[in-house]
Amino acid sequence: MVWAFIRNALGLKPLPWDERLAARLPGKYVIVGLTRLGPNGERERVEQKHGVVVTADRDQGIGIELQGAGLGEVYWMPPQTSTLQRAKPGSYRLKESGDVVENPDYIVTWLVEPAPTA
């Protein structure tokens, strides 16, 4: 992903980025929750992914090598560390896949809105 290019092209401010946290992310296990909204703000679907962080870069984003249903794919999150929340120890069953994740390091949730139309 080329988040820096998109951000600059749209004149957006950089997303909150903690360099010290980012340096510790590779190798950490993350559960990602995505709620996708439709054009009228209604919830269209919820997705859950999980895997191991393979890279965390301010310009490229946070790359997660997926486990479970997406095994082997790399999912890219925007370069924003402030959305990562420490996970409480325990078992997490993902509703969509039924996968059980034991003791992940972080949980992150995103609300995904459709792109505005002209």
Image: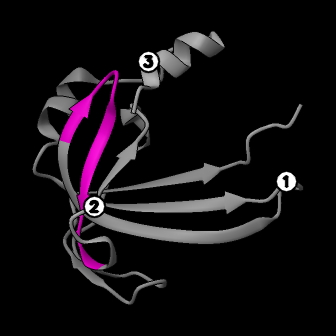
Left or right position of 59 against 10: left
Residue 73: mark: 2
Q: CA distance from mark 1 to mark 3?
A: 26 Å
Q: Quadrant of residue 43?
A: bottom right
- The percent coordinates of residue 21 (x first, y second) are 21, 32
- The percent coordinates of residue 82 (x first, y second) are 41, 35
Amino acid type of the residue tagged 3 in the rendering: Ala
Start-end of magenta stretch? 55-68
Q: Is residue 75 magenta?
A: no
Q: Main secondary structure of the magenta part?
A: strand
Quarter the N terminus occupies: top left
Mark 2 residue crowding within 10 angstroms, few (<14) / some (14–19) / many (20+): few
Give the residue displayed 27% in from the left and 61% down from the top: 73
Mark 1 residue crowding within 10 angstroms, few (<14) / some (14–19) / many (20+): few
Give the residue displayed 34% in from the left and 21% down from the top: 59
Residue 39: mark: 1
